[in-house]
Image: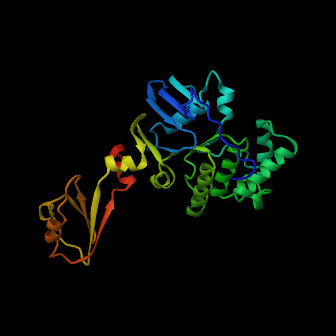
Amino acid sequence: MGKEEKVISVKKDDASKVVPAIHIKNLVKKYGKLSAVSGISLDIMPGEFFALLGPNGAGKSSTIGSLCGLVNKTSGEVRVFGSDVESDYKLARSRIGLVPQELNMDKFEKVRQVLLFNAGYFGLSGTARIARVDSLLHELGLWSKRDAKVMQLSGGMKRKLMIARALLHNPDILILDEPTAGVDVESRRSIWEYVRKLNLAGKTIFLTTHYIEEAQQLCSRIAIINNGKIIALDSKDKIMKDFGSQEIVVTLSSAIKKLSSEQFGYPVEARGKELIVRVPKGDFDYKKFLKRIIDLPVEKIEMRQTRLEDIFVKLTNTK
């Protein structure tokens, strides 16, 4: 990124084993009788761009809160680069920058003053504080709004300001909790581009989101959480391979009234002028399939992989 971007130091147990940036083991968080998180375990490695996907109320924010010390976990182990988040709180927290879901800064204060004030919490002072704040304002496209009040910013600019605040102490890990909720498309793309650059520079990114496109665009590894439990955890490609399937999309010049799976030999769904045919894993007889549709008014035939969104809906049973 810039001259101030530091190289991540990686702690090792021995010469060959890299300590995870984030280590969560058997994490449980209960609110009374309600279990928000039910014994989840995962490791996020240094420099990784990781997504925790789940519908609202799945346990994402409770997991983040336990990691950042915002909520007291009921049981389990949570470590940041080997440091326990409770017994070694200061060191663990110093390596994390958190962008929460909700705006939690003085909306009547000016943008630059918000960052200058918060920089003091991280021990920055004098010219170093000013340089860091101004650098982030330029990087995130907020320099022209430096003297505007927070309440005068657009939704996208407020999100960028929260990212800037989280990066003041140049943490090794950036946690983004639903970072683009309610943000316009242009601002969303701009935020994506910026966090990609941070990740390429070596920063570990932990993203929670229910925007499936966001995870698919940005992350290499994904965990899907539902009802406080992780129901899938692997690389994006592996999850799509294991839980998804290929489908043939047949575009017709006009819709057909009657439709049956027997006619095609495979499960089929009509979407207007499109016929979606689910291709089973294993052998698929394309010649036989083409013979079955030869009498239809076919304009185009495409093969595509099931979208991550379809897999997410199937696994979480959301509508």
Residue, far right: 126
Residue, far left: 262
Q: Is residue 248 above or below residue 61?
A: below
What's the residue at 66%, 48% (across, down)? 163
Visible in this render: residue 319? no
Place of residue 119 in the rendered image (x, y in percent of width and height, measured from the top left): 78, 41
Q: Is residue 12 above or below residue 292?
A: above
What's the residue at 60%, 51% (across, down)? 200
Q: Is residue 208 above or below residue 309?
A: above
What's the residue at 46%, 55% (across, down)? 213
Corner quadrant of residue 296? bottom left
Place of residue 250 in the rendered image (x, y in percent of width and height, measured from the top left): 26, 69
Q: Nearer the viewer, residue 9 or 140?
A: 9
Q: Is residue 172 above or below residue 285?
A: above
Q: How is the image coloured?
A: rainbow
Q: Nearer the viewer, residue 19 or 177?
A: 19
Visible in this render: residue 309? yes
Say left or right for 286 vs 211: left
Place of residue 185 in the rendered image (x, y in percent of width and height, measured from the top left): 55, 62
Say left or right for 52 vs 159: left
What's the residue at 63%, 49% (across, down)? 201
The number of discs equals 0
Place of residue 208 in the rendered image (x, y in percent of width and height, measured from the top left): 52, 44
